[in-house]
Image: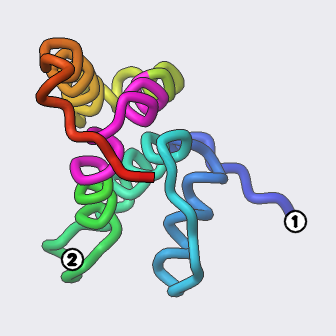
């Protein structure tokens, strides 16, 4: 049987990531699937008020500590917002990505943290 989720932001893939999180199954979140995952988890109310350490909190932490730290991930996530523009705007994803990119543009090269190989 096929289950169709018409009103789920990110569709069945995002719902599957949320379900796997609930059941403790290992998942991989990246700049490419972050947006639908966050939107779906917000719709499903997977936040801290329901249970400590829930999916929304983990995704928001990943967003600020990983995605927004790098050029490539900030740009990739911004591009991913095209599929869910209203959700992305309402959740502040677009603004945060743009702010992160602008900050990187305005940072003099001498002040950029360089990672070691």
Q: Which mark is residue 1?
A: 1
Magenta-drawn stretch, dominant element (helix, strand or loop): helix
Report how far apart the C-alphas of labels 2 and 1 lie in the structure.
30 Å
Q: Is residue 72 magenta?
A: yes
Q: Which mark is residue 109?
A: none
User: Is residue 83 rendered to the left or right of residue 2?
Assistant: left
| Nearer to us: label 2 or label 1 | 2
| Viewer-proximal residue among 38 and 62 | 62
N-term mark: 2 or 1:
1
Q: Secondary structure beneath disc 1?
A: loop
The residue segment tinted magenta is 63-78
Count the marks: how many?
2
Tell which residue pokes out farthest to the right in this image.
Answer: 1
Crowd tier of the residue under label 2, counting other residues whose Cα lies within 10 Å: few below 14, some 14–19, many 20 or above? few
Crowd tier of the residue under label 1, counting other residues whose Cα lies within 10 Å: few below 14, some 14–19, many 20 or above? few
Residue 7: x and y in percent read 53, 41
Residue 70: x and y in percent read 34, 37
User: Is residue 61 rendered to the left or right of residue 38?
Assistant: left
């Amino acid at each position: 049987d096929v289950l169709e989720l018409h009103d789920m932001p990110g569709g069945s893939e995002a719902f599957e990531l949320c379900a796997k999180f609930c059941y403790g199954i290992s998942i991989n979140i990246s700049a490419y699937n972050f947006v639908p995952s966050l939107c779906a988890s917000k719709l499903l109310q997977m936040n801290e008020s329901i249970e400590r350490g829930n999916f929304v909190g983990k995704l928001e932490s990943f967003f600020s500590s990983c995605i927004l730290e790098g050029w490539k991930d900030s740009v990739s996530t911004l591009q991913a917002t095209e599929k869910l523009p209203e959700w992305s705007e309402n959740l502040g994803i677009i603004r945060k990505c743009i702010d992160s990119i602008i900050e990187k543009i305005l940072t003099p090269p001498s002040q950029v943290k360089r990672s070691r190989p």
